[in-house]
Amino acid sequence: MGLLSEQPNVVLSSEQLEKFQTEGCLAVPNFLSEEDVEMLKASCHQLVEEMDPEKHSHTIFSTTHNEETKSEYFLNSGDKVRFFFEQEAVDNVGNLKVNKHFALNKIGHALHWFVPEFKKVSFSDKMKATAKQLGFISPAVVQSMYIFKQPGIGGEVLAHKDCTFLSTEPQSCIGFWFALEDVTLENGCLWYSPGSHKTPTQRRYIRNPKKGEALTIFTSPPDPDDDLNYVPVLVPKGSLVLINGQVNHKSAKNTSSKSRHIYTFHVIERHNAQWDPRNWLQPTPDMPFTGLYENSP
Ligand SMILES: O=C(O)CCC(=O)C(=O)O
Ligand SMILES: [Fe+2]
């Protein structure tokens, strides 16, 4: 190994930083150790093992359907560990059609704070060093998710920019996305549109100021998008994928027999940047936004 491994504060090379600036997305292979990957998978397995589907299976997560947006369960998940089911895993009266270990779309949104294994990885020195190289001055981890992309039924994620959901002024969000299994064209890899982070969007997903209606709404329809520009991010397990909050990205349904487990958390800047008070996700007394540099596992 060369220079990089001899400098603990240098995780990304200047070429990698430049690619991230230009394209808005960057894959960094071998970021997590094999042990970390297995630790996160085992920790998640334990959470599912202890989860009673009866208590959660009404809360289907889907970006193509609207059930979730009506749900308090989603809206109040920012400071909790909550379970969201795949559309196709639940029948029309809410009973599971498959084993609970193959039924979840995701767990969110505070794994990084309440589950020790996820906290260990999220607030590691390597993560802090990476954020410093990306230019963060006072970053906070605002949310985290474990996304399963279950074999056969793992749902599509429609094209979006993360700043639609996690907006600051000026925009500052970066997604840290970790492959916990090999990611391929078959099992629903991430796709992004290089350079699209340079085109801002006004589209926001906000708490509905009108009472008695859906709890959350989009402020405008999706922006025009060009399907032809997308490139796949094919990465082995252990890879980090950095996602600029303004880059268009999406993932297809998993029609293969292999799952695609990932862990992701989103970081925003607090220095000279303002969290949008309309964002669906808001800090709470139970969990004010957790500073990356000042917290440790
Ligand atoms: O993992 C996926 O399929 C999409 C995840 C995503 O949109 C994100 O982490 O911002
Ligand atoms: Fe996203």
Image (cartoon, rainbow, N blue to C red):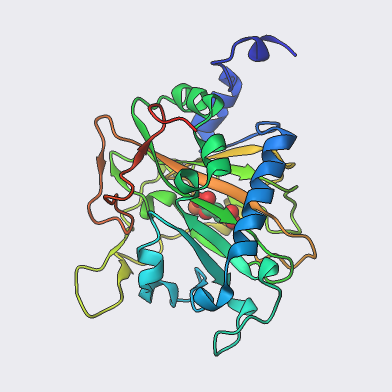
Q: Nearest the camera: 288 or 8?
A: 288
Residue 143, image x, y percentages: 43, 48
In the drawing, does residue 113 fall left or right of residue 254?
left
Q: Tell me which corner region of the image, top left, top right, bottom left or bottom right, holds residue 99.
A: bottom right
| In the rendered image, the vertical position of residue 206 relative to residue 87, given as above or below | above
At a point 68% along the width and 71% down the height, the residue shown is: 153
Q: Residue furthest front?
A: 50
Q: Quadrant of the N terminus?
A: top right
| Residue 252 can be seen, yes or no | no
Q: Tell me which corner region of the image, top left, top right, bottom left or bottom right, holds residue 208.
A: bottom left
Q: Nearest the camera: 61 or 249?
A: 61
Q: How many labels, in total? A: 0
| Residue 107 can be seen, yes or no | yes
Q: Residue furthest right?
A: 257
At a point 67% along the width and 56% down the height, the residue shown is: 45
At a point 50% along the width and 68% down the height, the residue shown is: 63
Residue 86, image x, y percentages: 59, 72
Q: Nearest the camera: 196 or 278?
A: 278
Q: Residue furthest bottom?
A: 93
In the drawing, does residue 269 fall left or right of residue 240?
left
| In the rendered image, the vertical position of residue 6 relative to residue 241, given as above or below | above
Q: Tell me which corner region of the image, top left, top right, bottom left or bottom right, holds residue 204.
A: bottom left
Residue 173, image x, y percentages: 40, 41
At a point 28% along the width and 51% down the height, the residue shown is: 284
Residue 236, image x, y percentages: 74, 41
